Structures are given as C-alpha cells and as structure tokens.
Amino acid sequence: MTTTTVFSARRIVTMNPAQPEATHVAVRDGRILAVGDLAQCAAWGPHTLDERFSDKVLLPGFVEGHCHLKEGSLWDQPYLGWFDRRDPRGRLWPGLRSVDAVVARLSELDAAMAAAGKADDAPLIAWGFDPIYFSEARLTAPDLDRAGNGRRPIVIAHANGHLMTVNSAMLQAAGIDADNEVEGVMKFEAGPRQGQPNGELQEPAAMYLVLRRVGNAGLLAPLDDAGLRAFGAMAKLQGVTTATDLVNKLGEADLAVLERQADDEAFPVRILPAFQAFHGTHGAAAGAEHVQGLVARNRDKLRYGLVKMMLDGSIQGFSARLRWPGYFKGSDGQPGGAHNGIWVTAPSQYEADFEAYHRAGLTIHTHTNGDEASGGAIAAIERVLARHPRPDHRHTLQHGQMIDRPMFRRMAALGLGANLFSNHLWYWGDQHHDITMGPDRAHRLDACRSALDEGVRLAIHSDAPVTPLAPLFTAWCAVNRITPSGRVLGAAERLTVHEALHAITLGPAWTLKLDHEIGSIECGKRADFAVLHDDPRNVPPMALKDVRVWGTVLSGRVFPATGG
Amino acid sequence: MAPRIPFTVIGGFLGAGKTTLLRHWLTLDDGPSGSGSGASGRRIAVLVNDFGELNLDAALIAQAGGGAIALSNGCVCCSIGDDLGNALIQLLDAWPPFDAVVVEASGVSDPWRIAQYALADPRLVLDGVTVLVDAAAVASQALDPLLADTLSRPLAHADLIVLNKVDQADAPTLAAAQAWLARHAPPGVPQLQTVQAQVPRALLGAALYQPKGWGGDKRGGEGRGGGLPGHPAVAHDQRFESWAVQPEGTYDAARLRAWLQALPPSVLRLKALLPLADGRWAEGHWAGRHASLRLGVPPPDDGAALVAIGLAEQLPCRALATGLDACRIHPA
C-alpha cells in the first residue's frame, strides 16, 4: 500500500506562477501529490505529517545544467585556489592569496603525508592554482622547493588545465633539465639559474613529461564510485537535485559506475551525462547510435540522451574564437587584436556532426565561449534546421559568454536555449574588463537580461569544477554582476532574484527536456526540493549567496547536507 | 637502451588527404627492392582521430578491438581518444617496439604542438611534420574568415608541404592554391605535389632505412641514389635521393650540433651515429627543420654511419661531405 507524507514548511516557493507559495506539500510514490495548506493536502486521504521543515523554506531542487562530476573526485587532491572553497565534507578551504601561503599549505600537506606513512618520494598533487590573480612574479620550482624537505615531488595543476608548476624533485624525477627541448618546458630567462627549467610546464606535451612519471592517477583518474558519491555530497550541500555531467565518453566502465550509483537509494542526485561527441571514441553516426541505444537504459536518477559538442576554447585562456576586433590585450599584456583563439572542432565538421546527432533525435549542448564561435554555431544550426526541421529540439548553447542581442534574436527564432556562465562575472570579471574583452565589451559578458528580453530560454551555470557548484551563488552573480574589485559589469544585464531562481530551476530543466518532471513544485512532478534556512527572495540581493542550505529532498527522500 | 622510435606528425585541414595518406602508408608493400622493407618488414603504429574514416580492407585486419586495429602486416592503428599522452604511453609500452609512430593531427589542431611529444619522450625522436594542403579547395576555404588562420597556422612548422589532389584542381585553381602557399608557407620548406596523397613512405625517416653498414662492415665510402654496392637503395621513388656514408674517425659534439642546426632545407631527413673523441657515441637527427644531437648507443660493431634524404637533384651531397669532414677531430 502506498503511503503519503505531508511536509510542512515555513514557506514553499513553488516557481509555479499559478500558485507561487504554499505551506504544505504532499508526496506519494516520490511524486508531488498536492501543494497548498494542510487541509488541501489532507483532502487526499490518510497521510503522515512530517514537520521537520516547519521552520525551513522549500524551493524546487536546484538544477545544474552545466557541471562535471569531477567536482566530487577532484577533492581526492588538495585545493590551492585563490578563492575560498568547500569540499564534499563541508570543510572550507581558505583561498591562498600569496606564494608564501601556497608554500605554507604545501608544507602542511607534506607533513600530513609523512605522518600517514607515505614514502618520501610519493608525489603531492594539488589543483586549483590560478596565476591570473597573482601580481607578484610567477610561481616557480624554487618557491615550491621551500615546502617540506624538498624531497617529495610536488605537482600543482593550474585552474585552466593547460599548465602545471612542479618542484625540483619532480623535475629531477621526470628527467627535465636544461637540455630539454620541449617548447612548453619554461626556463629561467636571467639570473643565476638562467637556462635551467623554472618548473612551469605549459601545454600537453610538457605536462606529459610529468604525467608519464606520476601515472594515470590523481587529476587524470577515471570516474569511480567514491568520486560520484563525493559529487552527491557536494550536491546535497548546495541544494542540487539534478546535475549534468557535461562531457562523458560513456564507455562501459563509465556506465557501470553511473548505473551502480543511480540505483543506490542513498545516492542523492539525478545525473544527466552528455556524450562526448568531439575528439572522442566514435564518429558521429556511431556516436548517435550509441547514445540512442543507451536511452533504453534510463532510470529515475540517470538519464542518457544529451550530446556535448565543443567549438572553441576559453576567453581567459585566449583560445576562444572572437569576432573583430578580437582580444583587447594579448596573453602578454600587449594590445591584442592580432591573434584569434582556436577551433576545437572545425565549423564544417561541427555542422556535419550536429546534423547526425540532431537527426537521431538527440539534444545537443554546444560549448561556445567567444562570439565568433557562438555565431558559427547559430549559422550551422540554422542550416541544419532548414534541412531537417524538428520541433522542440531544445538544442542549447553553453557558456555563450559574448552573445549579443542580434544573436539572441536569431537563437530565439531557431528555438535555441542559452545556458550562460554567470560565475565568470565574479571569478574573471575584472580580468575580462582589464585584459581580455576591455572595458566596453566586458559589460555584455553573460548577458542574461538580453537573452530573456529577446525571448531565449535561459539557464545559468557554474561549470564545476571550473568554479564551485553552488546555484545560489550562480544566481547571486547574475543578480549583482559584481566583480572582486567592486565593479558592476553591465548593470542593465542584471536579473531579478525571481528570474535568477528560474534560471537555476525551470530554466535548466527546459534545456534538459525535463521541465515536465522537475524544476517547480507542482502536482505530478518529482518531489525534489532544496531545503533552505531562509527565503532567498527576502534577503538583500547581495546576501543571496549566503542563504544557508539545510539539504535536499529527492523523490520524497530526505537528504540532510551534513551527516545522514 | 633501445633505439629511439621516429615520430611523424601529419597535419592539414579536413579533406586534405591525411586519412588517405595514412591508409597508403599502413597498407603499402614497397616490394622486393630496397632493404627488404615495405609494410612487410617495418611495423608502423598510426594514431588517428577516427577509425571509421580509415576504411581499412577487412582482409588486412588481423585483430580489432579495444581502440586498436592490428593489421596482418604487423602495423597497428590506434585511436587517440581524448588524450594523446595516454594513447602514446600504451603504444610505447608495446613489445616488440614499433619501427615508427605516425600521428594524425586533427584538422584544426597545430601539428607542431603534437610534435612536442617526440621531444618529451626519450623513447621517441622527432621525424618531422608533414602538412597536406587540398589543392582543389584551399583557395576557396581561405576566403572564409572563420577559417583563414586555421588553414595557415599548421604551415608554420611544416618541414614538408604536400599539395595534394592536384588532379582535382584545374589550372586556375591550382595556381590559386600555389599563390596561397606562397603567401603562407615559410620560406625554404620543400613542397611536393601529389594525387591521392601518394607520399613515399621513405619519408618516414632515415631511421627506417638503415644501411647495412649501420652495424655492418666498417669501411669508408659514400653512395648516392641507388646506394653503395651491397647497400640498399634508400628511396624507392624517383622524386627522392639519398646519400649514405660510413665515415672514419672521431667527431666533436659541439661542431656536429652546429652543423646539424645549419643544414640546408633541401635535406629532408638525416640520421647519424658517430663516435666522439672520448669514446662515447653521438646520435644526430635532422628532421622537421629541427636538429638534435644526443648520446647514443654504440653500434655492436663500431660501424659509424650517416644517411641523408632529400628531393631528387636537390640533395647537396658535396656540401654534406665537406660539412661532416669539418666536424671530425681525428684524423684532422
């Protein structure tokens, strides 16, 4: 016999315009049976009243439409970033604002490894360091040599993924010396060590020198059960009940891990992995067939059917494709304009592959950072749709950081959604203003208001682990558009709190073709809630990111953020 | 220490003929001439982006699966996947080692960045960057502002440019392609015109063509083209010629390095294994407009050797001989 649970709450913010607020929600078989007051819920018959949320505020469970499951497993390695960040256990890692602070934390980690009985030469691998925030000279091997006794190889992966800095012990273990000819092995240009490697390794071939020594561990480790559970813990902490893994090869080992966790009652989040349809394991025809075959294996907490394509690189990495006049300044700080970014996929290849996946009935999410890449995607999709119209395809441009109003109008005409990278406004907003885009174009970075005005379905995202998984923070970025220096980028592009909440619930649910199942609290949908201590609509906009998350409810099952 | 494996990168935009070239090299049988090589004797490992496009004849496939296809002639074709480093680690762990590794750069990537892997792994030696250009399409593709820089970028570090599909380009189209190349190709880079990407596999490096003297009889002498009496022909294509010597004496490492770095572009490939004054041996390579000189493994019979390959009629054999002589310490 089925049972009905009625949850009472201080307030329920439904995101359903027909019934914006309520105090009670009835849940049966994991779905929402009724929303309203106690009497309206009780009218459905016998029930258990659960009052544990009577002083909490319920919202629809947050939907992260662009993140990566690595947000969980990365925490197997220590974090060295500039900004504070919380790990899956809820521990706060304070940001490191100087080379000395980085060295001090490395010394602590080295001592902890020694105390745990790790051999002297077991490598210490850390992540999240981003030199773009440091005004002092670059981090080099001699800096890192001050950590511990200098015998342990140390590898620091930079946040952008294209660089690492290693200590002298690691240089020696990898056989990297003054004679090394790889272009990405950076050397001291002057001083007593002139010509010696300085510890910075740029681009894959130089990093390969280290990776072939430290092996397929650490940062390159494949997705495993522990990593997925850690991601689940992160999701609970942030009120997330549905998340994408927006690039996954979906090989047999990946599928086994995903399906094992999705079938575990204790796993607290729905996952939508997107098949890697660029530089991957399959050509387009075979890839489309592979994903179509997987859809039959969908279950409540695991949905196949998304496809990820990628057109260009990143703006802060100077690899995004920009329209004229290009970068404001180059990576060397000199006036830019000369050099454009790179195509990760050639536009013609993109169009052909897109067509294959589109015709297979799949939904395609395309990474486009620069405006030339976004324009290229729009033009290609326009031609594909003219050849093969398909109602309600839900294809979405991801990041779309420099899309302007004319492009949003074309997107609206084509039915394309936009999932914009609002977190960039905070994390790299000052760099976009001062270096990459310049003080004029930086104001239209992640132009959420323009998207809505022009009739484009909008979601906003973190791209975790690039920035932290935390939808309320992402909403805060879109509402305030403030940078660490206190500058407001494009005040006219700000969203209201309600619009921002929509862009972390129903908005992304639309891009995932799940808006009939999740994204709002209304009869018939999954009983997925974010449980908050306060109503985000009733705090000052600048405090939106500080609204505390108690935990989540997924299909009626309660998941406290801590413990349980 | 095993000899280092020559590493070649094939670049060029979509449709330029990279896959056709790789299929040609994987399945080629050079025939009975030469060092008894051909596909039958040399095991090549090819790393590609997409197997499907390679369209290999089923009769040639000995075994397939796990991201690799083994051919009955000993060659192997592997998928790069999303991590070339990982693919290389697996490939280089194979035993016995392959005789050459060829990597297909994707149509939009810079082959020079891939070439860096050969400098990163001590088991590899860079054997050059070959960039294919579609004679029939490049001029019109270059008009697309989205593509102009993507098309020209790979040329910057090419050591051989292959203008392919010349049969599919009419005279004005071919002239336009050549004019585009003249604007974007670095000066002095040798160019070859082909149909169906029929690039001779001789280009897979001097290392593939080890004269018998490479560990054979110790004797002086030199040869051009067909080689010394009793020596293999080095190149099987009339568009190439070779120069092979087994020099006497001992050499100076610094002078050798300087000489290698200043070789004229008409030398496509050069490999040398020479004794130094202190009894150690130096292994020198010239490829990809890139010279390297490192300590090498002494040949079992102390047979010094040097072989160079160039375009027919363009190989400066006399200058090479003079330059090599100038690096010798004893007899002075």
Image (spheres, coloured by chain):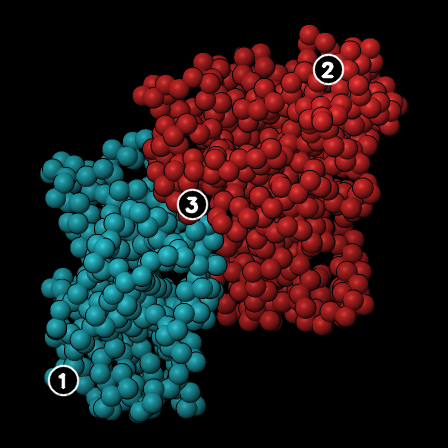
Chain colours: A red, B cyan
Chain letter for the residue marked with disc 2 in the picture: A
Residue B187 shown left or right of residue A246 in the figure: left
Give the amino acid type for the residue marked by disc 2 in the picture. Ala
Q: Which residue is drawn at 64% across and 60% down?
A: A155
Are discs 1 and 2 both within one chain? no
Q: Is residue B163 above or below residue B144?
A: below
Chain letter for the residue marked with disc 3 in the picture: A
Chain letter for the residue marked with disc 1 in the picture: B
Q: In this view, does A55 lie above or below B65?
A: above
Front residue of this view, candidates A91 and B189 = A91
Q: In this view, does B306 lie above or below B191?
A: below
Q: Mark 3 highlights which residue?
A: A279
Residue B120 shown left or right of residue A128 in the figure: left
Which callout, 2 or 3, points to the residue nearer the camera? 2
Q: Residues within 10 Å of mark 2 (few under 14, many from 20)?
A: many
Q: In this view, does A246 lie above or below A478?
A: below
For residue A38, which numbered disc appears in the image? none
Picture quarter with the C terminus of chain B: bottom left
Q: What element carries label 3?
A: loop
Q: Is residue A454 at all visible to an observer of this figure?
A: yes
Give the amino acid type for the residue marked by disc 3 in the picture. His
